[in-house]
Structure formats: C-alpha cells, structure tokens
Image (cartoon, rainbow, N blue to C red):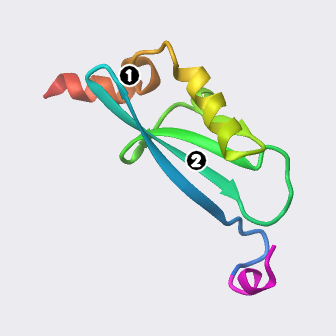
Amino acid sequence: MNDKLSQFLNEGDLLFSSTEYELYKGDERLFIRVGELIGEGKENRCLAVPHVFIREAQKEFIGRGNSIDSALMDCLSKIKNLSFDVIFPSASSEKDKD
C-alpha cells in the first residue's frame, strides 16, 4: 500500500475505492457498488455488491474478481434472469405492505 495512505490506517484495516452503477430491471431500479481493494495484491480483490439504498442483496449475488470489470460481470451474470423479488426478498415483502 502507498506509504502515505498506510499512515492513516490501523493494522488490519482495508481501504477500497468504489464505483456505483444503476441497473433498471423492468420497473425496478437497483444499484451495484463495485469496490477494489487498494494496496495488497490479493486474489479476488474486487467485489460487486447489488443493493437498494441501504439494503444489500443476498451474498450469493455478490460478484468477485481480480478487476472491477470481472467483478461486475460476475455479479451481472448472477442476477441476469432474476426478478427484483428474488435478489431482494425482504425489500419486496416490505413494498407489498405499502
């Protein structure tokens, strides 16, 4: 990790840079936050996490990869043919209450 950054982090802290995408699935909209670990060269250093504001999708829909693109593609392949209700089951049940 960059020495300038490491002086501001505690041992064991992980710092990610992130980018966010919006995906429209029919009438529903979700976001995919893609983060890349800064510093240490670990495998699967990027994660793509679908979410609806503060609610994240279930763990099986999180994309992983060694680059931002590969993590995003992994995530998109996992949610491609799924409805919003499958990706966010608790979000759909709360929506039905309104």
Quarter of the image where the N terminus is located: bottom right
Q: Earlier in the sequence, mark 1 or mark 2?
A: 2
Q: Which mark is residue 5?
A: none
Quarter of the image where the C terminus is located: top left
The residue to which callout 2 is attached is 34
Q: Secondary structure at mark 1?
A: helix
Is 96 placed above or below 7 here?
A: above
Is 43 placed above or below 83 here?
A: below
* Quadrant in the rendering for residue 59: top right
* Amino acid type, mark 1: Phe
Is 52 placed above or below 74 here?
A: below
* Amino acid type, mark 2: Val
Is 14 placed above or below 70 here?
A: below
The residue to which callout 1 is attached is 84
Q: Please give the name of the residue rendered at 71% of the width and 65% of the height, measured from the top-left corner.
A: 14
* Percent coordinates x, y for residue 64 in the rendering: 70, 37
* Quadrant in the rendering for residue 55: top left
Q: Please give the name of the residue rendered at 68% of the width and 54% of the height, measured from the top-left corner.
A: 36
Q: Magenta span has 5?
A: yes
Q: Please give the name of the residue rendered at 73% of the width and 64% of the height, measured from the top-left corner.
A: 38
Q: Is residue 58 left or right of residue 5?
A: left
Single out the residue that lies furthest toward the front: 69
Number of residue marks: 2
**Mark whose residue sits in front, 1 or 2:** 2
| C-alpha gap between disc 1 and disc 2 | 19 Å
Q: Residues within 10 Å of mark 2 (few under 14, many from 20)?
A: many
* Percent coordinates x, y for residue 20 in the rendering: 48, 49
Magenta residue span: 1-8
